[in-house]
Image: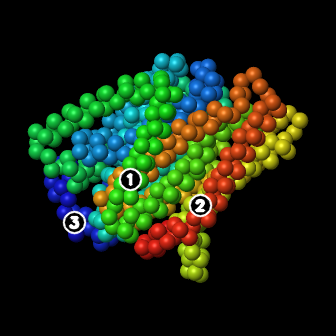
């Protein structure tokens, strides 16, 4: 039994024994996760189309802005954990973040360029900070040895994907008629529902055992005030950075390189040999994963534009919205995750070595093949250059399989490869990889043909060339990772059961 101090100042006990199916508040967080994700899914899948089709942005400008949007969204996750735990409380920060998202979507519904920057900065501040809050509120409800935590996070992950499914589906419906005002108001509804659930279950969601809980009354209110000031300052700062997306993208990449080099230096100076070897394995895997995430982050950028302009979206007489195609990924993750876990368990019981290095290598092959099937579809396209719908489906299936192989094990490997004192910074570095990849994906999307004023038959060869380069590049990196497997296994040899 573990006694914790909660946000109200009283003592709360978290038990490891399953006296109840799930701790109080976990069920509420599942439904909060669904509606909190819905709004982000709308912007994630629609931002590039909205900027180009309604506001007149060039495809290059829209892709660059989307890259920066993704970079800050992932980068703010780490800061959100710090701000919630030490200044505002995770519960307060989550609701304040959702309010910022509501106002951001409302401003975006005005459909003008100035509103785009202010709306995005408010939405991004909220979404970037409050994702960590949900995870922290959930994990605090379990004692360290409570084995129910894994099931709770699986449910939470399912809720997130359900939110993506609803968001992508709604976004596609409004996108077909280009009813963008209704689209952003739809996103607002999801955010408001998340706030209502949070307020209705307010007492059950109190923070437990965070540094803020041990502050004096005066320190508590001082920190709350500082946290509110930080929120207010972040909005105009992010707005400024969004309007200078090229500079911001370069800054994110430079910052990522500096952090990676510092982590390399830290690894070389680490005195415990076995821990140093595991850190070296982490650095190699993180560097290889960058290639995967760059290609994966093309989905809301260049790949979305390719789907909109070069794919036959009329299937059996039904008009398919580009956002609906991304639901392929959602369904594969929800349905394929448990199935893949069972398959891997069966293989391991038979003596097969399914571990971290092998899964990383296979993920690169999967996403590489996901790119390489698209030139095949372009080659087999009709006289108008429009590619059959099945090819984008096959591409997304392969990309989603790659995500299943790398995403869950990527977060799990931090606890296995990182020394306790470096787990925070190495988790932050892993999240930063995704942010840097988002910026690079924006640059890669800029290499793709401009669709404005061009037909599919004209842009097809350009798309085919870029997809071939990306696909074969990922396969080549996958081959390098495959050759490094013996070395990586030797470096990780001190870790028990290095697979999932």
Q: Is residue 245 visible?
A: yes
User: In the displayed structure, does residue 131 sit left or right of residue 374?
Assistant: left
Which mark is on residue 135?
none
Q: Is residue 486 above or below residue 133?
A: below
Front label number (3 vs 2): 2
Q: Quadrant of residue 312?
A: top right
Disc 2 crowd rating (10 Å Cα; few below 14, some 14-19, many 20+) is many
Residue drawn at x 54%, y 53% is: 289
Which comes before the other along the chain, label 3 or label 1?
A: 3
Front label number (1 vs 2): 1
User: In the displayed structure, does residue 224 sit left or right of residue 155?
Assistant: left
| Alpha carbon distance from label 3 to label 2 | 43 Å
Q: Which residue is mark 1?
A: 265
- Residue 134, x across and y down, in percent: 37, 49
Element type at mark 1:
helix
User: In the displayed structure, does residue 324 sit left or right of residue 341?
Assistant: right
| Alpha carbon distance from label 3 to label 1 | 38 Å
- Residue 268, x across and y down, in percent: 38, 58
Element type at mark 3:
strand
Front label number (3 vs 1): 1
Q: Which residue is mark 2?
A: 481
Colour treatment of the image: rainbow
Q: Which residue is mark 3?
A: 2
């Amino acid at each position: 039994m573990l006694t914790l101090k909660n946000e109200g100042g009283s003592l709360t006990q978290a038990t490891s024994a399953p006296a109840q199916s799930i701790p109080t508040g976990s069920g509420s967080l599942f439904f909060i996760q669904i509606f909190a994700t819905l709004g982000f899914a709308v912007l994630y899948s629609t931002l590039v189309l909205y900027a180009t089709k309604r506001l007149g942005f060039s495809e290059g400008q829209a892709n660059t802005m989307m890259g920066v949007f993704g970079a800050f969204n992932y980068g703010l996750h780490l800061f959100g954990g710090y701000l919630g735990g030490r200044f505002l409380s995770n519960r307060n920060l989550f609701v304040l973040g959702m309010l910022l998202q509501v106002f951001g979507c409302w401003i975006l519904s005005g459909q003008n360029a100035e509103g785009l920057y202010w709306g995005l900065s408010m939405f991004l501040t909220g979404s970037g900070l409050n994702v960590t809050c949900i995870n922290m509120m959930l994990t605090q409800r379990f004692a360290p040895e409570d084995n129910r935590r894994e099931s709770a996070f699986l449910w939470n992950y399912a809720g997130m994907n359900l939110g993506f499914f609803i968001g992508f589906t709604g976004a596609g419906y409004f996108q077909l008629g280009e009813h963008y005002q209704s689209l952003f108001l739809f996103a607002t509804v999801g955010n408001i529902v998340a706030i209502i659930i949070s307020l209705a279950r307010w007492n059950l969601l109190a923070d437990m055992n965070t540094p803020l809980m041990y502050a004096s009354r005066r320190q508590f209110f001082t920190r709350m005030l500082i946290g509110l000031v930080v929120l207010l300052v972040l909005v105009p700062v992010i707005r400024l950075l969004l309007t200078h997306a090229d500079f911001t993208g370069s800054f994110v990449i430079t910052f990522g390189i500096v952090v990676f080099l510092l982590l390399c230096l830290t690894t070389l100076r680490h005195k415990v040999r076995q821990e140093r070897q595991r850190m070296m394995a982490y650095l190699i895997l993180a560097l290889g994963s960058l290639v995967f995430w760059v290609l994966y982050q093309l989905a809301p950028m260049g790949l979305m534009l390719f789907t909109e302009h070069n794919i036959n979206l009329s299937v059996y007489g039904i008009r398919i919205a580009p956002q609906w195609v991304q639901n392929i990924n959602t369904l594969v993750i929800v349905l394929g995750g448990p199935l893949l876990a069972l398959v891997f368990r069966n293989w391991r019981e038979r003596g097969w070595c399914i571990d971290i290095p092998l899964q990383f290598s296979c993920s690169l092959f999967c996403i590489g093949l996901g790119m390489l099937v698209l030139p095949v579809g372009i080659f087999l396209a009709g006289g108008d250059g429009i590619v059959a719908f099945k090819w984008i489906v096959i591409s997304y299936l392969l990309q989603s399989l790659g995500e299943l192989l790398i995403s869950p094990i990527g977060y799990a490997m931090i606890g296995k490869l990182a020394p306790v004192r470096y787990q925070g910074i190495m988790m932050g570095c892993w999240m930063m990889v995704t942010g840097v990849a988002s910026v690079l994906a924006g640059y890669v999307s800029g290499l793709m043909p401009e669709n404005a004023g061009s037909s599919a038959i004209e842009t097809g060869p350009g798309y085919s060339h870029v997809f071939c380069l990306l696909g074969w590049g990922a396969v080549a990196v996958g081959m390098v990772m495959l050759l490094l497997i013996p070395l990586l296994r030797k470096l990780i040899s001190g870790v028990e059961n290095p697979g999932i």
